[in-house]
Image (cartoon, coloured by chain):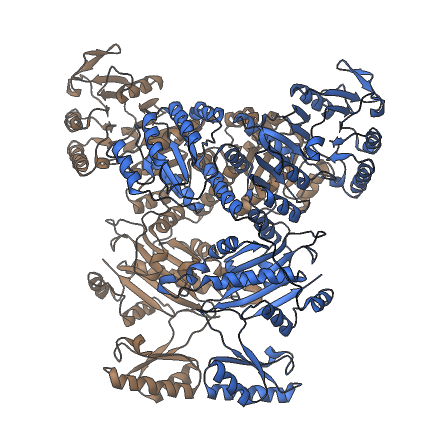
Chain colours: A brown, B blue
Amino acid sequence: MSDLNKVFSPKNIAIIGISSSPHKLSTVIYNNLINSEFKGSIYFVNPKYKNLFGKKVYKSILDIPEKIDAVVIAIPTDYVKDVLIEAGEKKVSLAIIITAGFRESGQDGLKRELELKEIAQKYGIRILGPNCLGITSTHNKMNASFSAVNAISGKIAFFSQSGAINTALLDMAQSRNLGFKYFVSLGNKIDINENEILNAWINDPEVSVIGGYLEDFYDGNDFVKIASKANKPIVILNTGKGEASQKAIHSHTGSLATNNVITSTALTQAGVNLVDSIEELFATLLFFERSKIPKGSKTAILTNAGGPAVMLLDLLSNENIVTAKLESEIEKELQKILPSNASVHNPIDILGDADASRYAQALNILEKSKKVDIIFVLISPQYVTQIEETVKIISEISFKSKKCIVPILLGDKYMDDALERLDDRKIAGYKFASLAVKAIKHGINFNFYNKNSYKIPKLNLKIGKYKNILSKIATVQTEPLPEMLSKSIAREFGLTLPQEEIIHTFDEAIDFVNKLGFPVVLKVTTESLPHKTEYKAIYLDINSKEALKHSFNKLMSLCQKYGKSEELLIQEFVNSKIELMSGAIRDGDSNVYTNFGHGFGHLILFGHGGIYAEVFKDTSSFIVPATKEIIEKSIKSTDVYKILNGYRGGIKYDLNLILETLQKLQKIVQTYPEIESIDINPMMLTPDKCYCVDLKIFVKK
Amino acid sequence: MSDLNKVFSPKNIAIIGISSSPHKLSTVIYNNLINSEFKGSIYFVNPKYKNLFGKKVYKSILDIPEKIDAVVIAIPTDYVKDVLIEAGEKKVSLAIIITAGFRESGQDGLKRELELKEIAQKYGIRILGPNCLGITSTHNKMNASFSAVNAISGKIAFFSQSGAINTALLDMAQSRNLGFKYFVSLGNKIDINENEILNAWINDPEVSVIGGYLEDFYDGNDFVKIASKANKPIVILNTGKGEASQKAIHSHTGSLATNNVITSTALTQAGVNLVDSIEELFATLLFFERSKIPKGSKTAILTNAGGPAVMLLDLLSNENIVTAKLESEIEKELQKILPSNASVHNPIDILGDADASRYAQALNILEKSKKVDIIFVLISPQYVTQIEETVKIISEISFKSKKCIVPILLGDKYMDDALERLDDRKIAGYKFASLAVKAIKHGINFNFYNKNSYKIPKLNLKIGKYKNILSKIATVQTEPLPEMLSKSIAREFGLTLPQEEIIHTFDEAIDFVNKLGFPVVLKVTTESLPHKTEYKAIYLDINSKEALKHSFNKLMSLCQKYGKSEELLIQEFVNSKIELMSGAIRDGDSNVYTNFGHGFGHLILFGHGGIYAEVFKDTSSFIVPATKEIIEKSIKSTDVYKILNGYRGGIKYDLNLILETLQKLQKIVQTYPEIESIDINPMMLTPDKCYCVDLKIFVKK
């Protein structure tokens, strides 16, 4: 048991601010403690009273003769500080501060909050809140919160930044007999925060699933690091994704990647399941607590009605979940036991007159299929349907099976008894197919990311050749790095750039094309002409000696007229109909990979490039460091991948070239965390090379 | 009252195949009739019995002394035919055939079904089914179905092809006290089908909302025509969208548009609301039956908790529903009555300690805003929340308001009493924000399409110049029309094509560029060289007289070597970085716009073009005929629109040019319904023209 688990399991509690009014939060919490059958002693503190509810009321916590583990503070804001000092002197372990009026109420409140923090540090007292609902822990029957609904005992642990969502979730959980070990309201998180809690819970064998509602992350990077160590599901409702926190970032690539993308990419990659609504949160917690994690993503449907099965297929295909094709032996076996007009191809329709035993026979056969990871069992209430018998049988088969079997009971009150049977047997059943599908999607993702997780072997990073110069530039620079330095860094890690040479004579230009052939690009350098675009000082796609001569002469005379030195740059002209892009953008500062770092690190993007990349948004991303599997999944999730993979008889490119490029990018930003963003657009693929045609690097401390 | 309403309101019913067993469907239906308090006489027919349940049992329907309006036939398949003949002789108006074993069981069944159809036509008897659950109509208290759940009385009318979905829906409706006038199980639809029913219901003043579950459309085109005449909401769950019926169509444009796209575009455009799941179906029916239709799409949120409001904002932005910015006067008024730390900017957070009267004051102010069409009122169960009082006040304000006010009660059982109050007062309330948002989206769409509906003034179409040749070619042609004919048709309707001329001498080429300037394209014609691509016989982007001379000479010598005649085509070279596409594809045959037509007619597409148009799928579509408003909405829903509308200081193009082009396309396919598909890719926009650069037309009878 980690420290926090101990802190959260006090043997006794003092309620500061107990009142004779049943409506005061302190009294509500007292009643909740009594109703939850808390076995420890409860002490009252309030100078206004001598006795209340048949108990002595102390003037101060210091007057209580016993050692006190936890205090609940529900008193006017102005008194909190003094009470906390007394609690410190009393050597209390945990102060649950219900009182509001701190950071959330402005500058003065923030000041008051910082005072509390100081006191806590001085005395070594841990604080939950302030401005929180309290905590429920069911293993010691302690509901030290003013939640209107009680949590029942179980193996889910939940933290939350919203009282409103807590009550709604607990209400749903109570209906479905879904239990919690912990239910913690975080409040303003001045001491105990979600990261410490997460860490404690992933190491707590009595916790099987972790859930949370977060409006902001105390330290997102740390959260991800902790989450990636978990081998149990974590389900988070994180709101504010729509408009929130869209930083204007100067790099082109950057503005594609909002902070929201960084947060959700990082969390997803660490195996965290992100949900969009309370109902999805609940459906997903229920799933993870009661269902088997699917070993893959192939689904089969067993149904007693065609309509709902087709509807379910549509819902699955909306979420890109694949339907299994069954082995012919399995189909034959099904054929033997089913009526002739049943359908033995997935979805398996065992017809409206299916009784419980037909469900059992069919499910037992289907369960043997090696092509199936997930089986949905649809029960529509038809005239002969034996609903309760059927769910009993599904439960029994599900217990023995290694597959993820999910019953869906279509209806409302009519299905309540059967759903209760499933709840009694701890099988995750659903009434709404749409929520069942969302929950299963999270199951599939958890399986993928848990296997291919964030934990990649530590790279053996050398100190980069340009370390010194970069860290110097990083403190002052706002423009992109000089072209030559960007290219040097790219070459250091083996990125493929178009070949190029600085030339001074036409003969040198001819030497270059004799080596590398046409077509080429000819342009001025920053030495010869600082702002080349103003003079149209670039010739693309030069295909003949005549054209080369022509452009050489034009550019040279430009240099002679405006330039500092007479030099030109000749380059391979890389051409491809498909413009790709890739890049990186850093969340946090250049210390992000150190122990002092805040932020998620670098997000690496890949997708369809060109000047309209941002309009069409065909990009995918991953957070550094990522495994090969995650990078591949990322590449394959773009539309442009379909083209690169041989679209309509077109060239099938070697996708390893992209994979390697993205891996190199990953290595670059780890070596040089000073890099704030990299923008490679266009990037172009040829049969044997992945060219970074235009490359910009921005650095920032 | 139309005929069908009369047929569905029989004064008496004979149950053929009544049985002493309580499990036989006939007996279940009898019990449902009794339980629903059907006031008409009920007769029994079954040669096996003399008396049952205290009633005389007749050997044949012909033996019943009275005139019979309706029969319920629930007997073995083989006897249905003879019984139907007797019913015909008895001049029965409606036969509800429960018995299965027809089309759904194969070829023999189909034969049996056609026999029934013939008998029905001969005697003028109307058939519901076969293979159906029966019909419930609450205005005459008739539950002549074997549904396990009864419908309560109300103003929704529902038809369905799935018994399973019926029961689930009725079960949900019963929990929420949502009532139906009709609940009709369609079965195999050999006579009465959804189109006839839809037509009857849109004309029935006692029906306020029409719902349906359809696996296939009897005649989709007709359905759309009928639906577009409705001024009441129609909500359809149409499954099988995922993989269904994807025809391989040869035209490039065509394969973008699957039948599924055609169906859903046509239905949406006719104002039909398409839903994906039973829960969304229910939530939407509830919304339309109880809520006011929003007059626009701008939403405001009134909440007593921040977290759920932010979650709701995210859900709204997922569905592209906009959030209103309030008038500063409204914000000031709110400020006056709310605590200082409340938020008066949308979402309006009236804080956790909000009681019913604070909700009332704030809602009354918000309700006056001219910037808001829809108000979500979020109620989170916090300690002081007066849930039932609050919903009472919301109901009262909602009754008086012209705005769409939607309460969301976050929780489960804890919220049941309050939800019941809302149900009693006929206010649409929701527990799940995600479903509320989906329902509101349908409300917004209904408002848009009802105002800008399918009913456009009949075009004054002339007979096309090429009518004769096209109808001839349509019977034999599989290749695209010859280029010159396609272009002639395009010019007939004023589509802009690149200017071009056939030339025989270099002087003629020079004349062309003197008139129109560079750049130009030079290529061979089909006369000069039939398969031009094999010889690379096209030069693009010719920019100078030298280049023109060079390409002229090259092509002419090709013609001299391989060709029939020495002629070339010179063309304006239209260049644009953004390749667009447009096109049309026909559903149904060339009779589609006549009274004999089946199918939805032509779908017109617009979007981002180029060779990868299908990968990126940035297209939108509408069905012919469409109003200007619908075409504009369609254009604006593409991503490429953002570019055309002046992206990052780029050119802002005149979108009327696209609008006009699509309107011309619409006119072309109406004039020449022989056109099976048109493929314009690329289409290019310049500041004053919308060029159809490459145009292919396919025709087919």
Q: Quadrant of residue B587?
A: bottom right
> Looking at the picture, how far across and down is residue B274, in whole percent?
56, 43
Q: Quadrant of residue A89?
A: top left
Q: Work out whether B64 lies above or below B496.
A: above
Would you say A361 lies left or right of B60 here?
Answer: left
Count of numbered circles in the view: 0
Question: Which residue is at the front of the view, A620 or B210?
Answer: B210
Would you say B377 lies left or right of A317 here?
Answer: left
Q: Work out whether A115 lies above or below B318.
A: above
Hey, which residue is sitting farthest front in the picture?
A: B460
Question: Which residue is at the front of the view, A52 or B112?
Answer: B112
Rendered residue at 34%/67% (across/down):
A695
Question: Which residue is at the front of the view, A409 or B77?
Answer: B77
Q: Is residue B609 visible?
A: yes
> Looking at the picture, how far across and down is residue B352, in whole percent?
31, 30
Q: Which quadrant is home to the N terminus of chain B?
A: top right
Question: Which residue is at the front of the view, A337 or A455?
Answer: A337
Hey, which residue is sitting farthest top in the picture?
A: A54
Q: Is residue A38 visible?
A: no
> Looking at the picture, how far across and down is residue B460, in whole percent?
62, 59
> Looking at the picture, how far across and down is residue A274, in whole percent?
41, 42
Would you say A28 lies left or right of A399 here?
Answer: left
Q: Quadrant of residue A331?
A: top right
Q: Work out whether B565 lies above or below B330.
A: below
Q: Which quadrant is home to the C terminus of chain B?
A: bottom right
